[in-house]
Image (cartoon, helix red, strand yellow):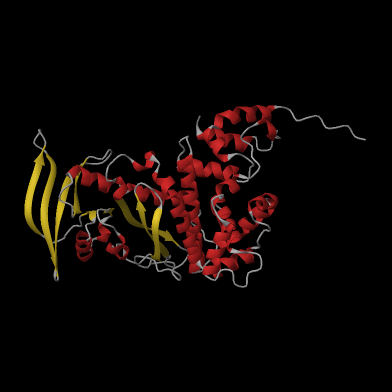
Amino acid sequence: MKESALFGYFAVVKQKRITMSKSSHFFGQPVYGQLIKSLDRDKIIEISRKYGGERYVKSFDGFTHLLAMLYAVIMRFDSLREIESAMKIEVRKLGHVGIGAVPKRSTLSDANARRPEKFFEEVYHDLYESNRKILSSDSRRCGTEGWIKRLRIIDSTTITLFSNAVFKGAGRHPKTGRKKGGIKAHSVIYANEGVPCDVQFTSAATNDSFMLAPRHYRSEEIVAMDRAYINYAKFEELTERDVVYVTKMKKGLKYETLLDFMEITPEGQMEYREQVVVFRKDDISHIARIVTYVDFRKGRQPRPVSLLTNDFDMRPETIAAIYRRRWQIESLFKQIKQNFPLRYFYGESANAIKIQIWVTLIANLLLSVLQTRLERRWSFSGLATMVRIVLMYYLNLEKLLNHPEADLEYMLAEASEPPPEPAGSF
């Protein structure tokens, strides 16, 4: 059954009365409560205290702040006014998930300015560590390649801001109007997990290469990255640490060729070209391997692609396959930007902006864990939309998502029945 059928049901018949006792999918807790069940209130408040987030706080503690922001991000609200209005409507249901009172706009605004974003960062990393085993168990994400568990992917994405005052934007100033700022999220993911294991924020003008820290990688790990990270000193340190890197060659790099050979197809065309080269800069001499192949991507003209690596043992097709896995982190950035509100921010300070991004990453992590645990295959966008639609419904979320046909037919039949006759007046 298509995901759109479920969306259509909730869009069309949500005003009909449904008898909840007849279906196994109805539940005593809202979907939101089931989604956040792995969040430990006491532990989260303790983390907030660690960073001074509970000083001078009467009722809007770190846990309540996190739940309010998560609710806003999952529902894709664009402003504090929307958050306050929606929470007032759902105030009784929100009490069942741990939000005792609806925060005012001013309360949420002050909390976003004052409670340190480091609190939300640690909550994210704690949640990530707790769910790594679940995330890496999904064969649909992991693939079957022997090197996939050793592969880390590094990249960055820029989130456009309202002005250039908080985080400096990249590029030249426009001829007319003010230049917009931007915050750059530098991220590292394990290919078999699919969510960030490390995130650093800078202004959009910061060069990516600072994020490549050789000391963070273990022996025999592989790191795939784009050409913005090329740095001979760091590449030499990675080699000394027995860490493999794979990146794309930049045009105009100067090197000395030590060895050059080519693999030819039976038709006489180049399949792969391999070169052993040495890069020299100041007192650094770095020996590397260049693998060149022809990319026959559908819808494009065939073009040569040259990759740079310090591995001399893997087959050229393996090196190419490792680099192609970079699409995974680009897809992650696209997934986050398409399914969560990062076009508008709930505060103008650097702290508020970072809080919203951390909460977005937490929401993405919670939905990724849910997606992995489900027997039924859902696209992330379809899953995020479905969760948003039923977030405050009293449904058994996993049963509904695993076997939607079972209750959908019953609920549609219930919705089509005429309403009961009104009782006689006395």
Horizontally, residue 199 falls left or right of residue 12, namely: left
- Residue 398 placement: quadrant: top right
Number of numbered labels in the structure image: 0
Image spot of residue 214 (x, y percent): 27, 62
Image spot of residue 171 (x, y percent): 34, 65
Residue displayed at 40% across by 69% down: 168
Q: Is residue 249 visible?
A: yes
- In-front residue for pair 77/43: 43
Above or below — where is 417 with respect to 348?
Answer: above
- In-front residue for pair 247/59: 59
Image spot of residue 64 (x, y percent): 61, 59
Image spot of residue 42 (x, y percent): 58, 60
- Residue 184 placement: quadrant: bottom left
Residue displayed at 68% across by 38% down: 15
> Furthest-bottom residue in view?
56
Residue displayed at 47% across by 46% down: 369
- In-front residue for pair 345/143: 143
Residue displayed at 10% across by 54% down: 276
Q: Is residue 115 visible?
A: no
Quadrant where the C terminus is found in the figure: top right
> Furthest-right residue in view?
426
Horizontally, residue 315 falls left or right of residue 225, namely: left
Above or below — where is 417 with respect to 319?
Answer: above
Horizontally, residue 359 falls left or right of residue 413, namely: left
